[in-house]
């Protein structure tokens, strides 16, 4: 087992042990690719959502938020293209009976080739002094061979996707000698398309009911409310509409913990602009969204932009912000230039105009749209993966610490009485009651102080406050910092100001302006 696989297993185990994520319906052996957020996971998830919401709606005068219903008129999904085009290429291995997404098989194969290139470059860097990467890439035969192979596969794959040539997609898998991870065989079925939408019936009698869909994305709820928001809010182009909420996809292969689930949550913003300005706004939102991620202090090397090989039917430009999860670089957030596809199609299918009158140009037009779409669950996983650490301390002991950005931490402060007697619990409760109106605070008096520190480190609590005998005499306490483990003696009345700068969302939001 690779080190990364070990790390991922440890992460999944940690999430359960410390109340972040549980398998849904676990007492009935669970439901595949469906998860419940525990007490600490819910708090962290809420904080991530709030950070996104405030950065979008609170910091931008021209962005407002809505909360559209999950159920929508079924024609919505015909107009959006989901009924006809929302599918993934499916392939099965005949020996293992295991099902795969054909595009993922190919993308992972190319990623392995690219990893070989990086390994060769690293080896050369160690071998040669004065190493020049460009020179090495241009002269080393092995690297050139790998690069040509990756480029050829990407070119064939892009062409096959654009032409919807599923036979060619299968041929790429065969020619690349891609094997099933379970059986090790290359005995593949043909590739076929699989629609990802869940359908249900609206009405009390099944025979008389209409088929409707669980929404596969939150964006369409924004588009069908475009004019409602624009007119009631007296919004002027450019402006945005933000929304967070549940979406549902009947994924072919739902795996990698909460990275790909059948029920998940999105945070999306559609930014409406004048036609012809999409290029500059696309670049603007790429930069803005990367800045949002960087404000969290996650290693910049773990993030990168990746342009789409095949553009969606609605897009004229699209890229992902990818994050290096324990299982490799994968999509975290998408930025898409959607043109006027959505509003134009809804106008066509509904028979109602979806245009904006621009007083500066004295003309009406169908706005273009730049979309930013991030998976809340994936963002949760990215933060957990980048924060979970095992540290060896100076005294030879070890600790597991979750270095979550303090402003997102589930619990901001833990308050401990050194002993459960002599007035210390009462003093500790006074401090807790002082802080609980502003932050999630916890109280604990079980076990020795060292074990209590370790428990709070493991759930990411930035500060621990200990009340002792001296606290009763001079109204001071010991405050311990999670990251440095440094302990300071401070006056109780200084605590709110002392922790506010680090644990409030304002500390993150200030980095964005």
Image (tube, rainbow, N blue to C red):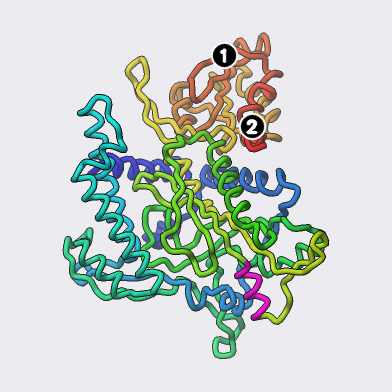
Q: Which residues are magenta?
A: 340-349
Q: Which SS class for mark 2?
A: helix
Q: Quadrant of residue 109?
A: bottom left
Q: Quick check: 101 left or right of 358?
A: left
Q: Nearer the viewer, residue 262 or 35?
A: 262
Which residue is at 46% across, 36% downward?
300
Residue 268's x, y, as percent? 60, 56
Residue 397 place in picture, x, y as percent: 34, 21
For label 2, the residue is 507
On the image, numbered disc 1 is attached to which residue? 488
Task: Quote the CA–CA distance across marks 2 and 1.
Answer: 22 Å
Query: Residue at (51%, 52%) from the top-left corner?
Result: 333
Rendered image quadrant of residue 437: top right
Q: Quadrant of residue 513?
A: top right
Q: Is residue 363 above or below residue 320?
A: below
Look at the picture and state if 167 lies above or below 9. Answer: below
């Amino acid at each position: 087992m690779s080190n990364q696989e070990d790390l991922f297993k440890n992460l999944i185990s940690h999430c359960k042990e410390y109340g972040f994520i549980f398998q849904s319906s676990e007492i009935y052996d669970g439901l595949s690719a469906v998860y419940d957020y525990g007490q600490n996971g819910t708090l962290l998830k809420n904080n991530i959502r709030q950070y996104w919401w405030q950065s979008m709606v609170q910091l931008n005068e021209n962005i407002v938020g809505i909360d559209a219903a999950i159920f929508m008129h079924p024609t919505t999904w015909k107009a959006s293209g989901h009924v006809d085009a929302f599918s993934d290429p499916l392939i099965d291995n005949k020996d293992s009976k295991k099902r795969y997404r054909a595009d993922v098989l190919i993308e992972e194969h190319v990623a392995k080739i690219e990893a070989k290139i990086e390994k060769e470059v690293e080896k050369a860097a160690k071998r040669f002094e004065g190493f020049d990467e460009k020179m090495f890439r241009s002269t080393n035969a092995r690297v050139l061979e790998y690069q040509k192979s990756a480029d050829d596969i990407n070119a064939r794959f892009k062409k096959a996707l654009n032409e919807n040539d599923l036979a060619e997609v299968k041929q790429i898998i065969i020619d690349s000698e891609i094997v099933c991870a379970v059986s090790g065989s290359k005995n593949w079925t043909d590739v076929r398309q699989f629609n990802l939408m869940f359908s249900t019936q609206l009405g009390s009698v099944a025979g008389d009911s209409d088929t409707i869909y669980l929404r596969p994305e939150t964006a369409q709820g924004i588009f069908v409310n475009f004019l409602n928001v624009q007119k009631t809010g007296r919004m002027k182009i450019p402006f945005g509409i933000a929304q967070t909420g549940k979406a549902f996809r009947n994924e072919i292969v739902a795996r990698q913990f909460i990275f790909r689930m059948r029920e998940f949550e999105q945070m999306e913003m559609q930014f409406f602009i004048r036609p012809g300005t999409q290029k500059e706004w696309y670049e603007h939102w790429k930069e803005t969204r990367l800045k949002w991620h960087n404000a969290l202090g996650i290693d910049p090397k773990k993030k990168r932009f990746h342009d789409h090989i095949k553009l969606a039917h609605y897009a004229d430009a699209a890229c992902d912000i990818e994050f290096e999860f324990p299982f490799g670089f994968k999509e975290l957030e998408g930025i898409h230039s959607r043109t006027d596809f959505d509003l134009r199609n809804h106008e066509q299918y509904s028979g109602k105009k979806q245009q904006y009158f621009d007083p500066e140009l004295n003309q009406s037009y169908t706005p273009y749209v730049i979309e930013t779409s991030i998976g809340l669950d994936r963002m949760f996983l990215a933060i957990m993966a980048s924060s979970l650490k095992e540290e060896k301390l100076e005294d030879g002991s070890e600790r597991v610490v979750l270095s979550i950005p303090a402003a997102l931490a589930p619990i901001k402060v833990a308050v401990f009485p050194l002993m459960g007697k002599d007035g210390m619990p009462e003093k500790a409760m006074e401090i807790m009651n002082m802080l609980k109106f502003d932050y999630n605070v916890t109280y604990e008096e079980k076990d020795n102080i060292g074990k209590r520190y370790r428990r709070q480190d493991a759930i990411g609590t930035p500060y621990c406050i200990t009340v002792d005998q001296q606290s009763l005499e001079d109204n001071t306490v010991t405050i311990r910092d999670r990251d440095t483990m440094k302990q300071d003696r401070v006056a109780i009345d200084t605590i709110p100001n002392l922790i506010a700068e680090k644990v409030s969302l304002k500390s993150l939001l200030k980095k964005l302006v």
